[in-house]
Image (spheres, coloured by chain):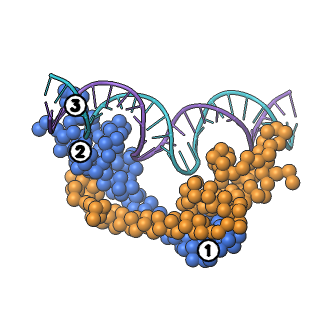
Chain colours: A blue, B orange, C cyan, D purple
DNA sequence: CGTACATCCTCTAGCGGGTAGAGGAGCAAT
DNA sequence: ATTGCTCCTCTACCCGCTAGAGGATGTACG
């Protein structure tokens, strides 16, 4: 097994080349061996690791969380409580984000629906943004 | 009218002091007059502008969009078509984001529900992330 | 064998939207 | 006059990449 070029791995994993190098730099992906001409040579293991990272990023896990998850993956004898916690925490974040975006959506819809396409002077969009009386339940 | 200090304005608008200075630097907020001791002195107009900006940022508008919206607000005789477009575009973005987060939520729930709190070796969280066969409908 | 062109290398700088901290000056109350 | 707060400017940093410069290497074709 001589290894694949960074370009091939990028294509197969759908992670861009500079991003792969970046992951190596921050220690998410081990530095692979090099060819005579100093080019990176990746194996199947690296492909799997990259896919793992991409999938985790798509789910919105932070790099530090992914680092922890990868460490767990590398030591399969440990308890998976930590992995579960990380996933739970992300789930809570996502749920909160959805709630908040639904509220935003409602407000944007109100703005857009009431806009009569007239002058800015009576534009509902601008008006709503200017309105001082919105708390978003931040207090209380 | 002698003007309020940056601290007072920050408190009232709930925009942090460095952020206010940052907005001045990028030209969202006009540079206010200064006191003898070189301190910024803000008026009611500035307070309103800051609230506008904060509200728009809470709705997720980008700084460039806010710049445009503020320009419109400053020229109330123009058509509000642009404002409407910006708000519509943001609405579409938010709707897409909600859809995508709902999919994430479902996947995270599946992961978390199936985790039996055993060893990592059979952890559903790690397993799911390792799974190569997920396309997220990115193609087609 | 030359040459064109793709792919790769390292390195530095930039994005958005701020945040943090150093080092100093001003101001208000005791 | 001293304490302690607020403010000033300036630079650097955060995340997760992305872009570009300037150069080396690899491959395909004539």
**x and y percent of residue A45 in the render?**
19, 44
Residue at image position (34%, 43%) is A19
Q: Is residue B109 left or right of residue C17?
A: left
Q: How many marks?
A: 3
**x and y percent of residue C3 in the render?**
23, 29
Q: Quadrant of the C terminus of chain B?
A: bottom left
N-terminal of the pair, mark 2 or mark 3, is 2
Marks 1 & 3 on one chain: yes
Mark 3 crowd level (few <14, some 14–19, many ≥20, 10 Å Cα)? few
Residue at image position (67%, 71%) is A119
Residue at image position (22%, 59%) is B133
Above or below: residue A91 compared with residue A116? above
Name the residue carrying label 3: A34
Instruction: Tell me if residue A132 can be seen.
Output: no
Residue at image position (87%, 54%) is B1
Chain letter for the residue marked with disc 3 in the picture? A
Instruction: Tell me if residue B69 can be seen.
Output: yes
**x and y percent of residue B89 in the render?**
50, 65
For mark 2, give the secondary structure: helix
N-terminal of the pair, mark 1 or mark 3, is 3
Please report contact status of discs 2 and 3: CB closer than 8 Å, yes or no. no
Numbered circle sitting on residue A117: 1
Mark 1 crowd level (few <14, some 14–19, many ≥20, 10 Å Cα)? some
**x and y percent of residue A46 in the render?**
22, 43
Marks 2 & 3 on one chain: yes
Above or below: residue D22 compared with residue A57? above
Occupied quadrant, residue B113: bottom left
N-terminal of the pair, mark 2 or mark 1, is 2
Name the residue carrying label 2: A9
């Amino acid at each position: 097994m001589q290894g694949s070029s960074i370009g091939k791995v990028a294509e197969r994993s759908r992670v861009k080349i500079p991003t792969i190098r970046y992951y190596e730099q921050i220690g998410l992906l081990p530095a692979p061996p090099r060819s005579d001409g100093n080019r990176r040579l990746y194996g199947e293991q690296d492909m799997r690791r990259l896919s793992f990272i991409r999938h985790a990023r798509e789910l919105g896990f932070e790099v530090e969380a992914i680092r922890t998850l990868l460490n767990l993956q590398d030591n399969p004898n440990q308890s998976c409580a930590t992995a579960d916690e990380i996933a739970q925490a992300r789930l809570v974040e996502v749920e909160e984000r959805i709630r908040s975006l639904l509220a935003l959506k409602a407000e944007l819809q109100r703005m857009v629906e009431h806009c009569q396409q007239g002058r800015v002077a009576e534009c509902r969009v601008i008006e709503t943004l200017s309105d001082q009386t919105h708390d978003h339940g931040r207090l209380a």
